[in-house]
């Protein structure tokens, strides 16, 4: 890929300026433009939308409105030719559109014209966003927060830029990142994103067939009484509750096949259908299932044998559909000789791992075991996807030193031939620990795993927090440096008392966030974002202070006075934030949570008395597993700019 950055009317040497200006295309100058945007009248909805987006953002940048024309009109002297059209054909450029697939694109200057050409589904749209971001400096940090540079003169030098995403499926599963425009502009095709035809759609899992589908395919309430043999035999007993399927049973295979084929016919727009284990253990111990598992040296064998049979039965009638199954917990180890069918996706899950160090180099046993399995699957699966985890599901607001390993882990996956990644973050409440930053970083690295980590972090902090970016970057480095330096492993269920945090570190973190608030004080919107993000450190402070207070007067923590000072602003921000839960497993009862904190910290009735700690209702956590999206996602509403 060759990328040459634009000249935004910046001062350069006279000789260089002369050479540069001889080759440049002036897209706009003084609020006017000699260019127009040309699309075929039969262009796809996303290509038509791409023309409108390009027109709108160029106007925001320069004040010039470039007209949109069709290729049926006579050619003009200066055109931005968007997508496949008669005009593109006349230029005679050698662009292999087929090799770009549905999402790849080429941006190329061609004499007095600029060409953006790619796949009709999303490639042309992504090409427009690629021009705006990679060449013109635009950024879309979060829904409603962007950076669109303003310039009186907008000129580009020679460009020859070809991009094809290495990942076919890219999903930051983050509440703050479901907005369709944000997804498209950051070139992610999330199943959970609100992506419509104008965005080129998305990688769509069938409704009801996203994950953990055994019970849906063969419901125990419907079949168990007459056919207990359909369900897993565990310790000599067929289970109705918390069961799996007997995957070698021919009737089970038939019922699953019929169910999937029926779903495929009913949902023609969906492309992925999951046939996957329920979210617990209890695999079938019958003689036939275990003979296969023993021969293949993995409990995935009976499951994969079932999945392969379903896939074989569906592929002729539905050649554009894929069957997905999990390599998760007891099915994670790859089989010895059994191989997935070409239309089968294996989704490898990293749930047991440490997420404070790169998967490729972490010395924890969990990560070593995962590396072994990932490398094994890379040798046997043609379509290997990953379900990865990037938050603390027991404490959504707890500082989680994972931002600096995201690109390392995505690079590790890509190196091992992974072609799709689902990054499960905080998906069922807004404003969790640095959620907007995490979503932005994830999107950047999913499109381009080689995108510079520090550049991504810094440009987000500057765009999202403005003048407060400096101390917030210091805070991010503070929590990450400790986990890296002290080799502290952090999984996705750690409590506030975990050693990756200390009282002294949180006192320092509190000072940094105080500086951030002071620096943002002149901008109400930015200050509001800083306060929302500060809740993470506040939460860690009050929860660790609660634990210290519960140990009695002898437990003198430097966090107790900090917690007393931060209690009111923390709970007030929490009340106005729209946050609905502090953990994955239970909704937040804010009055009860506040009352419990007041009592534990001795703040009730005048901020003076110490009392016995009262456990907040939010601390009862459901077991975390691979989690299906909740119905509440459809009600998310975010304004995008």
Image: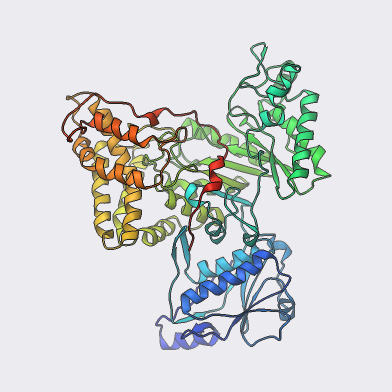
What colour scheme does the image use? rainbow
State left or right for residue 49 relative to residue 267.
Answer: left
Give the image location of residue 621, x and y in percent.
Answer: 44, 29
Residue at image point 78% right, 39% down:
261
Mark count: 0
Left or right of 255, for residue 165 = left
333 or 569: which is nearer to us?
569
> Is 534 left, or right, of 388 in this rendering?
left
One can see residue 2 in this view: no
Determine the residue located farthest toward the top in the rendered image: 236
Q: Identify the image quadrant of residue 146.
A: bottom left
Q: Check the picture and name the quadrant holding the N terminus.
A: bottom right
Query: What percent of the width, then of the height, locates residue 375?
Result: 60, 39
Percent x, y of residue 324: 68, 39
Asked if one can make out residue 191 in the rendered structure from this viewpoint, the answer is yes
Q: Nearer the viewer, residue 4 or 397?
A: 397
Residue 70, quarter of the rendered image: bottom right
With respect to residue 262, does 35 lie above or below?
Answer: below
Residue nearest the observer in this picture, 269 or 148: 269
Above/below status of 257 relative to 454: above
Residue 548 at x, y = what percent?
24, 29
Q: Is residue 268 above or below residue 131?
A: above
């Amino acid at each position: 890929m060759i990328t040459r950055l634009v000249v935004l009317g910046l001062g350069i040497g006279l000789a260089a300026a002369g050479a540069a200006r001889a080759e440049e295309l002036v897209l706009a100058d003084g609020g006017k433009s000699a260019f127009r945007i040309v699309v075929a009248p039969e262009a796809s909805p996303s290509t038509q939308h791409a023309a409108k987006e390009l027109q709108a953002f160029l106007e925001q940048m320069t004040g010039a409105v470039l007209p949109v024309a069709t290729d049926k009109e006579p050619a003009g002297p200066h055109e931005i030719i968007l997508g496949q059209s008669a005009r593109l054909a006349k230029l005679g450029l050698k662009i292999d559109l087929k090799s770009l697939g549905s999402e790849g694109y080429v941006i190329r200057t061609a004499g007095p014209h600029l060409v953006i050409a790619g796949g009709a589904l999303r490639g042309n749209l992504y090409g427009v966003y690629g021009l705006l971001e990679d060449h013109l400096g635009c950024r879309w940090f979060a829904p409603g927060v962007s950076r669109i540079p303003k310039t009186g003169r907008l000129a580009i030098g020679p460009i020859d830029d070809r991009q094809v995403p290495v990942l076919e499926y890219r999903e930051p599963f983050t509440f703050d990142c479901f907005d369709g425009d944000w997804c498209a502009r950051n070139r992610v095709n999330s199943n959970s994103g609100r992506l419509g035809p104008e965005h080129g759609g998305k990688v769509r899992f069938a409704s009801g067939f996203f994950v953990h589908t055994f019970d849906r395919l063969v419901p125990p309430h419907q079949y168990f009484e007459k056919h207990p043999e359909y369900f897993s035999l565990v310790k000599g007993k067929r289970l109705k509750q918390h069961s799996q399927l007997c995957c070698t049973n021919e009737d089970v295979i038939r019922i699953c096949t019929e169910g999937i084929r029926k779903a495929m016919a009913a949902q023609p727009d969906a492309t992925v259908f999951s046939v996957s284990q329920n979210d617990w253990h209890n695999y079938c111990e019958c003689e036939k299932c275990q003979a296969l598992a023993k021969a293949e040296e993995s409990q995935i064998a009976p499951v994969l044998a079932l999945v392969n049979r379903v896939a074989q039965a569906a592929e002729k009638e539905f050649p554009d559909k894929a069957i997905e199954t999990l390599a998760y917990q007891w099915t994670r180890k790859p089989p010895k000789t059994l191989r997935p069918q070409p239309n089968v996706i294996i989704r490898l899950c990293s749930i047991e791992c440490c997420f404070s160090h790169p998967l490729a180099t972490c010395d924890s046993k969990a990560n070593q075991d995962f590396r072994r399995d990932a490398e094994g699957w890379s040798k046997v699966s043609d379509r290997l996807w990953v379900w990865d985890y990037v938050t603390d599901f027991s404490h959504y607001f707890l500082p989680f030193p994972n931002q600096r390993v995201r690109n390392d882990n995505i690079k590790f996956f890509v190196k091992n031939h992974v072609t799709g990644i689902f990054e499960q973050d905080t998906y069922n409440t807004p404003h969790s620990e640095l959620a907007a930053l995490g979503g932005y970083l994830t999107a950047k690295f999913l499109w381009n795993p080689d995108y510079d980590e520090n550049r991504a972090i810094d440009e987000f902090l500057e765009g999202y927090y403005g003048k407060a970016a400096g101390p917030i970057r210091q805070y991010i480095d503070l929590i990450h440096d400790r986990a890296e330096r002290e080799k502290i492993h952090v999984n996705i269920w750690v409590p506030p008392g975990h050693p990756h945090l200390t009282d002294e570190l949180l006192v320092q973190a509190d000072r940094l966030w105080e500086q951030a608030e002071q620096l943002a004080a002149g901008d109400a919107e930015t200050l509001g974002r800083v306060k929302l993000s500060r809740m993470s450190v506040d939460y860690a402070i009050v929860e660790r202070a609660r634990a210290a207070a519960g140990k009695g007067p002898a437990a003198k923590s430097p966090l107790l006075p900090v917690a007393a000072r931060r209690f009111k602003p923390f709970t007030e921000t929490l009340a106005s934030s729209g946050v609905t839960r502090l953990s994955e497993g239970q909704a937040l009862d804010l009055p009860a949570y506040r009352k419990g904190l007041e009592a534990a910290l001795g703040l009730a009735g005048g901020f003076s008395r110490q009392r016995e700690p009262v456990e907040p209702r939010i601390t009862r956590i459901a077991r975390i597993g691979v989690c299906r999206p909740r119905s509440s996602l459809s009600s998310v509403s975010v304004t995008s700019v």
